[in-house]
Image: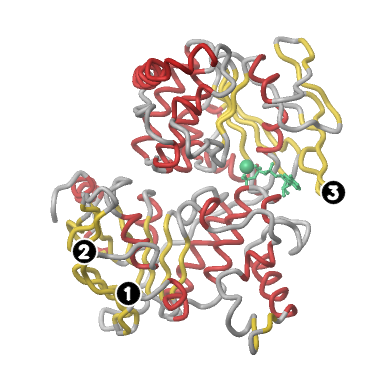
């Protein structure tokens, strides 16, 4: 890609960008939220036309007017936000736009079997007969990767593929990527997790505010140097230092929570947990052991079959979401793009959406526009949301900047209880440091914080206690001072404390 320029209104997303990737290499494309990574890759995937510059493949200029053009040139992209059609099966999703699809359709059963086997051979376990919408976030990501691979891409673009994978799944993906690279595929890998970048890539290109800021050969650099190139300064993540007050009042109290899913399977099994004022409890576990369900039950998106939930002694197990928000609960959901924002509406409207009905945003049933704007502006300022203004539709922001609005919305109203699920997923290193500081600040102000994360580093840095979940149960709770990696590792694998 040569001299690429893309401008959206006043924002120059790509400014004279040169970028090259070779066959057989895994090439990291890095940069802060809003640096222009996704934009550059959308050009390569035929989804966006640059205002200037050209794309060459094997030395020849190509015109990539559509995704089909890009596919014809062997370019496949796995997007930051999933593009699967939820009401179709994985096999159907993969077969859309595939040459010979009419021939295939009557034999979709065969195709599904073939795709399942194709995935399995590459370490991507998936049931191609499953409806895309029924898959977990990680499952949908696997389907997206499989879709690109199955179409025989020679240039594979992965926009933050590991953001939604567990560390184990990510390790599996890296094996897949290494094998693909070894067979000559060029892989472009976008990630905010520098340890992954150091482990899996051959070269690194860093974008900063739309320009190429640096490029490295991975084995000749280190995380610190790369982070500095991205941000322009050194960044250190905060750590919890002083111990929690053991005698503080309990705020969030869960007892005997049991939950079954639609198929009658037990997802939460007699879960009890108390979080005190000024305490962060990390919920650790291999993805899919009930952490997500626990968070959703606490915030009221699922109704427990048995058990009690209270905040400050007020029973809330049967209360609707709005009552829980009124009781001081803030929720940072896992799949923020799908569940937490409404793309066509403005930043200001999205920032107000949870609390629009009450003071200070409304008075006597009327929306106070000044308060609404001030609220959004303070979130934009505090969270360093890169945007052209609070009236911009949130869907136009980069992935990480959309996240910052959701985080700001949850954290800006001084919550009593924070339920944060994978809160730094998709955030750059500066925004991660900021969010960690926000959680610590809530703790200092006496909130009870439930931090669900598959990132052990994050859990270890911030938690007063760590509750480990396995198959829907809390199998042990370890105090910060007693944590060892070995103990944690055993418990994650299901061994009780
Ligand atoms: N369709 C659009 N309309 C207006 N502005 C846009 C549009 N798409 C991207 N932008 C802007 O271009 C800039 C670069 O966005 P891009 O999505 O490429 O960032 P990114 O590096 O992928 O960030 P992230 O790590 O958060 O995903 C941002 O300022 C974004 O708001
Ligand atoms: Mg992006």
225 relative position to 212: left or right: left
Residue at x-position 55% and y-position 19%: 25
Does ligand 1 reach within 8 Å of label 2's beta carbon? no
Q: How far across and how far down the image is residue 420, in percent?
A: 43, 62
Q: How far across and how far down the image is residue 444, in percent?
A: 44, 77
Distance of mark 3 from mark 2, alpha carbons?
Answer: 51 Å
Q: How far across and how far down the image is residue 88, in percent?
A: 47, 34
Q: Earlier in the sequence, mark 2 or mark 1?
A: 2
Q: Which mark lies nearer to you, 1 or 3?
A: 1
Label 3 belongs to which residue?
9
Q: Earlier in the sequence, mark 1 or mark 3?
A: 3
Q: Quadrant of ligand 2?
A: top right
Q: How far across and how far down the image is residue 176, in percent?
A: 42, 22
* Count of all numbered marks drawn on residues in the image: 3
**Could you classify mark 1 by the number of other residues whose Cα lies within 10 Å: few (under 14), some (14-19), or many (20 or more)?**
some
Which residue is outermost to the left? 496
Q: Quadrant of the N terminus?
A: top right
Q: Secondary structure at mark 1?
A: loop
Residue at x-position 49% and y-position 50%: 425
Q: Earlier in the sequence, mark 3 or mark 2?
A: 3
Q: Relative to 309, does residue 94 appear above or below in the rendering?
A: above
Q: Which mark lies nearer to you, 2 or 1?
A: 1
Residue 152 tag number: none
Q: Quadrant of the C terminus?
A: bottom left
Q: Secondary structure at mark 3?
A: loop
Q: Relative to 364, does residue 497 appear above or below in the rendering?
A: above
Does ligand 1 reach within 8 Å of label 3's beta carbon? yes
Label 2 belongs to which residue?
271
Which residue is outermost to the front? 106
**Could you classify mark 3 by the number of other residues whose Cα lies within 10 Å: few (under 14), some (14-19), or many (20 or more)?**
few
Which residue is outermost to the bottom? 364
Label 1 belongs to which residue?
318
């Amino acid at each position: 890609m040569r001299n690429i320029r893309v401008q959206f209104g006043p924002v120059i997303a790509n400014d004279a960008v040169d970028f090259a990737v070779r066959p057989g290499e895994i090439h990291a494309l890095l940069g802060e939220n809003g640096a222009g990574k996704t934009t550059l890759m959308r050009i390569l995937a035929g989804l966006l036309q640059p205002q200037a510059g050209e794309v060459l493949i094997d030395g020849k200029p190509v015109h990539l007017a559509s995704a089909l053009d890009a596919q014809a040139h062997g370019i496949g992209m796995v997007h930051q936000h999933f593009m699967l059609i939820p009401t179709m099966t994985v096999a159907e999703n993969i077969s859309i736009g595939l040459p010979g699809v009419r021939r295939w359709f009557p034999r979709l059963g065969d195709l599904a079997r073939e795709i399942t086997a194709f995935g399995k051979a590459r370490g991507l376990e998936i049931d191609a007969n499953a409806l895309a919408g029924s898959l977990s976030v990680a499952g949908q990501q696997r389907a997206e990767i499989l879709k690109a691979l199955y179409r025989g891409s020679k240039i594979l673009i992965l926009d933050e593929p590991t953001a939604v994978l567990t560390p184990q799944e990510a390790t599996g993906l890296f094996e897949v990527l290494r094998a693909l690279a070894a067979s000559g595929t060029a892989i472009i890998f976008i990630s905010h997790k520098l340890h992954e970048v150091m482990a899996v890539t051959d070269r690194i290109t860093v974008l900063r505010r739309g320009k190429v800021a640096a490029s490295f050969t991975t084995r000749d650099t280190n995380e610190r140097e790369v982070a500095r190139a991205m941000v322009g300064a050194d960044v250190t993540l905060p750590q919890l230092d002083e111990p929690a007050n053991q005698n503080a009042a309990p705020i969030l109290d869960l007892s005997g929570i049991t939950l079954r899913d639609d198929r009658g399977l037990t997802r939460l099994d007699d879960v009890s947990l108390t979080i005190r004022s000024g305490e962060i409890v990390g919920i650790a576990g291999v993805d899919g052991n009930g952490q997500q369900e626990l968070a959703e039950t606490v915030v009221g998106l699922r109704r427990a079959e048995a058990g009690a939930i209270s905040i400050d002694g007020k029973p809330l197990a049967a209360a609707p979401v709005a009552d829980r928000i009124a009781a001081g609960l803030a929720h940072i959901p896992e799949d923020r793009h799908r569940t937490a924002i409404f793309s066509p509406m403005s930043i200001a409207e999205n920032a107000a959406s949870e609390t629009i009905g009450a003071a200070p945003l409304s008075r006597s049933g009327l929306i106070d526009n000044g308060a609404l704007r001030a609220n959004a502006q303070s979130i934009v300022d505090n969270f360093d949301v890169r945007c052209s203004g609070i009236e911009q539709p949130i869907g136009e922001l980069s992935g990480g900047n959309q996240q910052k609005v959701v985080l700001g919305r949850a954290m800006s109203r001084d919550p009593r209880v924070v339920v944060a699920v994978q809160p730094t997923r998709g955030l750059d290193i500066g925004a991660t440091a900021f969010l960690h500081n926000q959680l610590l600040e809530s703790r200092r102000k006496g909130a009870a914080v439930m931090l669900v994360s598959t990132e052990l580093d994050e859990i270890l840095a911030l938690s007063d206690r760590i509750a480990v979940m396995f198959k829907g149960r809390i199998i042990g709770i370890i105090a910060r001072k007693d944590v060892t990696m070995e103990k944690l590792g055993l418990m994650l694998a299901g061994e009780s404390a």
